[in-house]
Structures are given as C-alpha cells and as structure tokens.
Image (cartoon, helix red, strand yellow):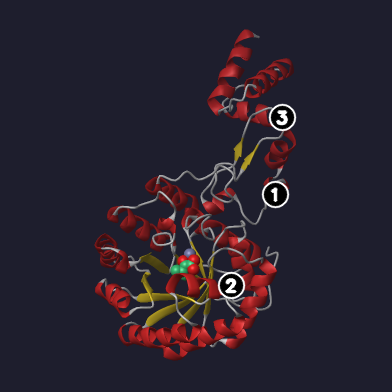
C-alpha cells in the first residue's frame, strides 16, 4: 500500500550519499582511509549510485582517501567536491573521480562575508570553472551555496549559467536548514520550471526538517536527493539516508534502488567507524524504532504488528527486529508470551508477582533486559 503518490514526483529517485564528505564534517568525526573505503563499499553494496568521497583540494590525506575509494572500484559513481576554482577541479581530476561537485555561494550574506564577490563575479567564475571541469569529466554537479536564502532571480541566473557552461545536474542546498516543506515545494517547483537540468537537493537539519524538506522537493519534481548515514553532517546534520529511503519507498512508492534490509547494518557500521552513537529514538534504525513497552501496544503488536507499527515498514524490511521492552508499562500478555518462548509457564498468581517485580525493578530507573525478566520469573516460579 502506498499512502501518497504526488503528481510531479518521479517513479524513481537517484541517491547521492555525502557521508564521507558532509558527514565527516560532523564535529569530532574523522574516518581513516580504510574506514572510508569500507563505508564506500557498503554504500555501493546496498545500491547507492553516487558517493561523494571527499574534498580533494582540502589536504593530501583527503586526496589519498578519494584516490583509494576510486581505486576500490565499488561500482558507484565517485564524486569529489570543489570550490569554484580551477586548482580545486585539478585536485579532483588528480583523484580520477567520475563527477565533480562545484559550489559557490550565491546568497548576499555569504557572497559578501565569505568569498567577497558580487553576483556578476559569481556568474563569471561559474561559467569559466564549470566549463573547464566539463572539458575533463562527463558529470558536473553545480551547487549555488545557500540557495534557499538567495534572491530567486539570482538563483535562476546562477543555475542557468552553470547549465549553459555544461553542468549536468543542479543541486539546491538548504545550507543552514531554514526551509519548511511548503516553502521548499514552492522553490523547487520554480527551479524545475526555470532551469533545464535534473534538480538535486541537499537539506540540512537545523530545525529537524531535513527529511521533510527533501521529500517536499521530490514532490515538486527533484530527481536526486543528497543524504548521509545516520543524518551526520555540519551542525545538526543532513537528511538521513535510512529515513529518506524508507519514506520514499514505503510512503510514496518511489524506488531508490537501495537494499533496505541492510539499512540497520549500514547505520551501525558508520556509527562504529565514526565513534558516533545513534540515538535509541532515531527513526528506522534506532534501538527503539520497533520496540514496544506499554501493555496495550505490546499486546496489540503480538496479536497483529500493524496495530502499532506502520505496516508499510516492518522491522525485517530495514534489517531490524521487533522488541517487546519490559518496564513500568509492561503488560501481562507480553510478559507471558515472552516467558512461554523460553518454556516458563507461571500461574496467574505467579504472573502477577512477576509483573510487580518487573515494575519495581524498572521503577528504580533500571532497564529490564530479557535476562533480567527471565531471572525474575525463575525466582518467582522457583519459589511457587
Ligand atoms: O550545505 C551546503 O551548502 C554544502 C555545499 C557544499 C553543497 O554542503
Ligand atoms: Zn552541506
């Protein structure tokens, strides 16, 4: 069942993963070259088609890592990031990437306070450097940085200049995450109409709206979306890969080419290499994503999982497992079912005692693990 099939959206969406570039900009995160190669292999293995491997001009180590990812031959298209400068393009070419992602600020605040360029200078640099890059690679992605705070006429002029110079895809970055889904839909509808190229989006999560804004862009006709594993990235991060993929696949019925049953495994691999703990409440991949505690919910899902789960997204679909958690909201049905699985069959009176003990245990602020539950039950049954 698909809940929502919007008119302008495509039947399939290309995923552009930037875990190894924007994701590595998460404060405190730094991957080794070996870890980057492993992550790139994992991403390509689950079906991600484009991987932004790094920013080659930033350092010799970064170039070495990007080269190693290219040499690994993952099967995905490998992209390198570059400022709007020929020497940055050369650094990408030196790594033999398949695609160059060229960015330049277009909003007034960023033009005036970062690169100190007028809009005309931005347009001239774009025409010159995009053209130069296209002489050497078939795929050039253009990003007018801070697009969502850029005057719309300036934005369209920048995008058209890039496309005329040879850009093959135009990315609209919500660099500081200030969009709302309705504003994003309006902007992307305008850009799709005015710019004759495939449109990509890169949404930051400053207000927790990155995934919602990405989906709104898809509704408006974007054909490519940028994501990171676990939503990593600058400040509050980027649109999360697992959430975006599952919303597209399960809610919209839009194909992403991703083997969704490996999403949890991918999240855990990146979490381990980044030394970055995924919150238990994280949708799709978090420990609690398919965990049920209250008696009513646990009873419901044991009867029929769709009672308190989306149904269109099951734990198996994402490589997770359903868990019944026992705490102060534990119910008789879930506890007795859990005990029956390990051949413990308390009487009604014993079950009451077990429940009382479970609630007292968790009331002291402790989590009741399966092993705790079995120990409590064995004690009660043994005493009976
Ligand atoms: O957030 C941003 O604008 C970026 C660009 C490099 C696309 O990461
Ligand atoms: Zn970014």
Position of the N terminus, as image quadrant, is bottom right
How crowded pointer 2 is (Cα within 10 Å; few <14, some 14-19, many 20+) is rated as: many
Residue 310, can we see it?
yes
The residue indicated by pointer 1 is 306
**Residue 191 location, x and y as percent?**
59, 82
Along the polypeptide, which appears first: circle 3 or circle 2?
Answer: 2
Along the polypeptide, which appears first: circle 3 or circle 1?
Answer: 1
The residue indicated by pointer 2 is 148
Whole-Å distance between the Cαs marked 3 and 1?
18 Å
Which structural element holds mark 2? helix
Residue 331 tag number? 3
For this orientation, the residue located farthest to the top is: 383
Residue shown at 55% from the left, 81% from the top: 155
Residue shown at 64% from the left, 71% from the top: 184
Along the polypeptide, which appears first: circle 2 or circle 1?
Answer: 2
Q: Is mark 3 within 8 Å of ligand 2?
A: no
- Quarter of the image holding residue 203? bottom right
**Residue 185 location, x and y as percent?**
66, 73
Judge whether 37 appears above or below 14 on screen. Answer: above
Which structural element holds mark 3? loop
Residue 63 tag number? none
Residue 197, can we see it?
no
Judge whether 356 appears above or below 220 on screen. Answer: above
Of residues 293 and 182, which is closer to you in this image?
182
Of residues 337 and 361, which is closer to you in this image?
361
């Amino acid at each position: 069942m698909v809940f929502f099939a919007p008119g302008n959206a495509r039947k399939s969406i290309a995923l552009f993963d930037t875990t190894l570039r924007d994701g590595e900009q998460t404060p405190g995160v730094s991957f080794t070259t070996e870890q980057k190669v492993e992550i790139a292999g994992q991403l390509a293995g689950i079906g991600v088609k484009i991987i932004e491997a790094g920013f080659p001009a930033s350092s010799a180590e970064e170039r070495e890592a990007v080269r190693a990812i290219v040499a690994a031959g993952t099967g995905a298209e490998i992209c390198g990031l570059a400022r709007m400068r020929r020497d940055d393009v050369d650094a990408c070419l030196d790594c033999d990437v398949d695609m160059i992602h060229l960015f330049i600020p277009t909003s007034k605040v960023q033009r005036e306070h970062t690169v100190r360029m007028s809009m005309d200078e931005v347009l001239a640099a774009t025409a010159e450097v995009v053209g130069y890059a296209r002489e050497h690679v078939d795929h050039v992605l253009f990003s007018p940085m801070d697009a969502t705070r850029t005057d719309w006429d300036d934005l369209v002029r920048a995008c058209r200049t890039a496309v005329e110079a040879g850009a093959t895809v135009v990315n609209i970055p919500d660099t500081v995450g200030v969009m709302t889904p309705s504003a994003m839909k309006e902007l992307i509808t305008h850009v799709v109409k005015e710019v004759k190229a495939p449109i990509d989006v890169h949404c930051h999560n400053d207000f927790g709206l990155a995934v919602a804004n990405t989906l709104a862009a898809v509704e408006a006709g974007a054909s490519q979306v940028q994501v990171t594993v676990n939503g990593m990235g600058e400040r509050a991060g980027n649109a999360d890969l697992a959430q975006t993929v599952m919303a597209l696949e399960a809610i919209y019925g839009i194909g992403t080419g991703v083997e969704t049953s490996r999403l949890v495994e991918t999240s855990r691999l990146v979490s381990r290499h980044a030394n970055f703990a995924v919150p238990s409440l994280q949708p799709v991949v978090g420990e609690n994503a398919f965990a049920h505690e209250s008696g009513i919910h646990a009873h419901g899902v044991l009867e029929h999982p769709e009672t308190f789960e989306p149904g269109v997204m099951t734990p198996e679909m994402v490589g997770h497992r359903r868990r019944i958690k026992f705490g102060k909201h534990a119910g008789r049905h879930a506890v007795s079912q859990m005990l029956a699985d390990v051949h413990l069959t308390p009487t009604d009176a014993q079950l009451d005692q077990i429940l009382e003990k479970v609630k007292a245990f968790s009331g002291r602020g402790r989590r009741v693990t399966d092993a705790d539950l079995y120990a409590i039950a064995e004690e009660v049954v043994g005493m009976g």
